[in-house]
Amino acid sequence: MTNVWVICRKELRSYFASPIAYAVMALFALIFGLVFYSATREFVNFSFRSQMNGGGPPMSVNEYIIRPMLGFAGTVSLFLIPLISMRLIAEEKRNGTIELLLTSPIQDLSIILGKWLGAMLLYLFVLGMSLLNIAFLFAWGKPDWKPVLVAYFGLLLQGGCLLAVGALISAMTSNQIVAGGAAFFVSLILYMLSWFTEYDSTTASRVLNYVSIVPHMENFSKGILDLKDAVFYVTFIFLALFLTARQMESLRWRS
Amino acid sequence: MALAWLKARQTQYTAYASVYILVVLALLAAVNFLANRYDKS
């Protein structure tokens, strides 16, 4: 466990030593801020209009602002996560330090877990940029905090899946651009699978729809913590990291 | 002699890795199937 933590810290430090971490955090903050501004402006306009027309039922901040915004954060992460994951193992290969890592007395699993955890921590910092906007809503409104917490948990799990897939792809190539592009392409397929299979009832379509990461996020964004969705994300992360370990292992006997 | 590739180290390791991956895949599919089947929500 100590090795995992050491590699995790080294990975996180190297993110902040390069412009990647700052660029990803700034991009996310900018996009999320724009969506926040747009969503709150629409919310305020709509509630004013509703009051002037005699008033209706009170509008929920969770339903009209937080839920769509965090759903949008999931979509944005689809573009940002390949930027985080592309260098995980590909850079070690390019620099020639992968041999040092593989011949050091550290298990492959510790290396992979450490790198994945480092990337997860950076993703946590990226998501943390949105907390400032959410804090404004808590300062001037009374949103329910529990669905917000569940939605953030879902975003973390979804990000963990995409980062694990990114780590697997990064282990397959020594070119960071190829790793980033392929990770984005695979993430996009995982995102869009449900669009094509939603209305099909064949077994293959149902399986493909299940593999898509979007339907599992719906419950989380509503604030529902469903065990089957959490199981899907955790098993997905496990599978991707397991395949990464097999890929790393194969570097020894393929050469 | 024609079957020498079957004893090659790469073939053995590839077969071992493939079986390992298939077993883990089957296990994870079973876990997901059970989680959906016994879902209370």
Image (cartoon, coloured by chain):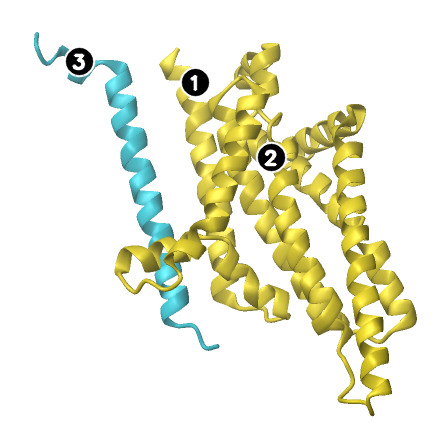
Chain colours: A yellow, B cyan
| View extreme (left): residue | B2
Number of callouts: 3
Q: Distance between the residues labelled 3 and 1?
A: 19 Å
Residue A107 appears anywhere in the view: no
Q: Which mark is residue A82?
A: 2
Q: Mark 2 lies on which chain?
A: A
Q: How far apart are marks 1 and 2 (CA)?
A: 23 Å
Q: Mark 3 lies on which chain?
A: B
Return the x and y of residue A5 as percentages of the image width and height. 68, 35
Residue drawn at point x = 75 percent, y = 78 percent: A60
Q: Is mark 1 on a helix, strand or loop?
A: helix
Front residue of B8/A157: it is A157
| View extreme (top): residue | B1
The kind of residue tagged 3 is: Trp
Q: In this view, does A50 lie to the left or right of A76?
A: right
The residue that mark 3 highlights is B5
Return the x and y of residue A248 as percentages of the image width and height. 46, 24
Judge the density around disc 1: few (<14), some (14-19), many (≥20) Cα neighbours within 10 Å.
Answer: some
The kind of residue tagged 1 is: Leu
Q: Is residue A97 above or below residue A154?
A: above
Q: In this view, does A142 lie above or below A4?
A: below
Q: Residue A128 carries which label?
A: none
The residue that mark 1 highlights is A251
Q: Do the residues labelled 3 and 1 touch (CB within 8 Å)?
A: no
Q: Are marks 2 and 3 in contact (CB under 8 Å)?
A: no
Q: Which chain carries label 1?
A: A
Q: What element carries label 2?
A: helix
Q: Distance between the residues labelled 2 and 3?
A: 38 Å
